[in-house]
Image: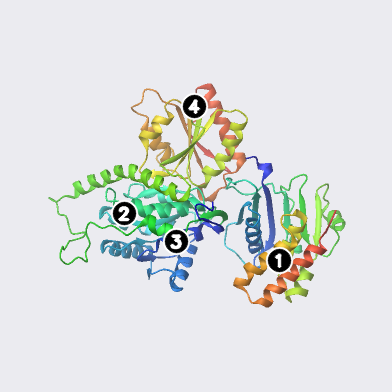
Amino acid sequence: MALLESKTVALVGNDAVAEAMRQVNPDVVAAYPITPQTDIVQTFSAMAADGLVKTELVNVESEHSAMSACIGAAASGARVMTATCSQGLALMWELLYIASGLRLPIVMPNVNRALSAPINIHCDHGDSMGARDSGWIQLFSENAQEAYDNIIQAVRISEHPDVYLPVMVLLDGFIISHAVDRMDLMEDEKVRNFIGERSEPYTMLDSKNPTCVGPFDGLYGYFFEFKRQQEEAMKNSFQVIQDVGKEFEKISGRSYGLFQTLGMEDAEFVVIAQGSGAGTIRHQVECMRSSGIPVGMIKLRSFRPFPAKQLVELLSGVKAVAVFDRSDTFAGGMGGPVFIELRSSFYEQEKKPLITNYIYGLGGRDLSIALVKQAMQEIHEMASSGRVKQMVNYLGLKE
Amino acid sequence: MATEEILEIRWHARGGQGAVTAAKTLAEMSLTQDMFFQAFPEYGPERMGAPIQCFNRLSKERISTYCGVTNPQIVVVVDPTLLDVVDVTTGLTEYGTLLVNSPENPSEIRKRMNIEGRKIYTVDATHISFDALGRFMPNIPMLGALLKITGLISKDEATNYLKESFGKKFPQKVVDRNIVALERAFEEVKGE
């Protein structure tokens, strides 16, 4: 640790995010507070007021205005960040598409919280999953350390010339945002050297090379081509996310890719999860592996882009796969969003595993060890019997 | 790693009595011992005076469980009036420990609450806090008693930590008084 010159601290997830933002020292932050993200804005505002950052902090009257201000600032060439969650993200909706369509590298932590109704302030992934088709890169974090690390990497990913897409860094509301956890902070200088200066192909403020940002495209314009190129940028981001992760490992000792695996070399059945739930599940996977049960797991970090090819390669030889989703799609029996993506990824494959879905933890319902054990037992039975009992399961319902 | 190797603690208090701060301070103190830890409140709107819970996990190894604590090895009751309001022994493990802010002896608590087995400790944190701080703020004496019975960190290490950490946030007088409260609880906690 001494070699890496890191500092071990006790921080809640939101403060870890604010600390990463301080180190990134963005030119502009426009944000509006909302539970459970509030502490990020509050702590960062205090940092700005204390002169710890050179950031121009824009206090806005809503999330719609927050993202609008971020878009304007990013288009002028500034390095820009904001933070939100749940209803706040929902209020940003139309601007999310504008940020990605204009190819603006904005980094936004989203503290995952359920969308009402009923009114609920607790964790699920329904808010960010709704934005899955908005053209933003979405990276999940298991804990405070990963949230901190993801934000630093997100700056590099979003500003990469092959990408130029906004990035959402996801962390679980309350479970991570409000819990004190042990983590390592990097030195300011190391972070600043890692992220470097913002690169910009065009800037509105360059009077010698004037550009027009966001004009009406008309019926005979290039809207379609813009959208196709956004998809290409998303494809490019696979490599960039992995490259940035490797480079980050060199300075932090912590490795990052599109996902993280455990026990995949001999696994007969595999669990896929994201966020803090992946931590609780890993605990159980480790317990089961120590008793010789051939279970493996994949913790999905990158949901957008979705690493279908790599996941299919890893999973085509296993007997059974269970996807844990902390949100639903209300498609009438299709299951959660990660499940739908993964199941669809196997369509062309002749060799494929049995696949089942566990929807859990909506509105903050606890994913207890007992529930994980129950699901694991069912998946083990599914792998042994070669039969899927039920495609979509709701784990931990009271009804 | 197995759950048995993680020490899980549940705190019962009322909003405004500093239990969340105590749980966070415990996490920070365990960092000085190079341990891994979590400290988290029962998530919801905090209301002054309403019963609240918060939790700790402590371990020598990395902790990856992010679920609620349902079977704590230790329960700390910061406010004695909660004994009649909340079932504080819910989920407490068979060989678990109950630490109560009370002027009574542990045997009296045991009899009154009809508890079999388990260890019971009491410390009069209310009295200590009035003496040392001049007001009802039982969190730091309860933390002192908890540190004593777990042996997690020594009295000197704990007071040194408070000097350094509280010294950054509070006037010297407040720091000194909290240290007195912590030390007294270390000495006065009794158990059976």
Q: Which residue is mark 3?
A: A188
Q: Please determine if labels 4 and 1 lie on a single subunit.
A: no
In the depicted structure, whether residue B115 falls above or below residue A345: below
Q: CA distance from mark 4 to mark 1?
A: 58 Å
**Secondary structure beneath label 3:** helix
On the image, the x and y values in percent for residue A186 come to 48, 56
Which mark is in front, 4 or 2?
Answer: 2
Q: Which residue is mark 2?
A: A159
Q: Amino acid at mark 4?
A: Val
Q: Residue at x 73, y 61 (%)?
A: B82
Q: Amino acid at mark 3?
A: Asp
* A383 or B164: nearer the viewer: B164
Circle 1 crowding by C-alpha within 10 Å: few under 14, some 14–19, many from 20: some
Q: Amino acid at mark 2?
A: Glu
* A263 or B48: nearer the viewer: A263
Q: Which residue is mark 1?
A: B159
**Secondary structure beneath label 2:** helix
On the image, the x and y values in percent for residue B191 come to 83, 56
Query: Going from the N terminus, do you reach mark 3 or mark 2 first?
Result: 2
Q: CA distance from mark 1 to mark 3?
A: 31 Å
Task: Using the image, name the chain to which the residue with label 1 belongs.
Answer: B
Q: Are marks 4 and 2 in contact (CB under 8 Å)?
A: no
Which mark is in front, 2 or 1?
Answer: 1
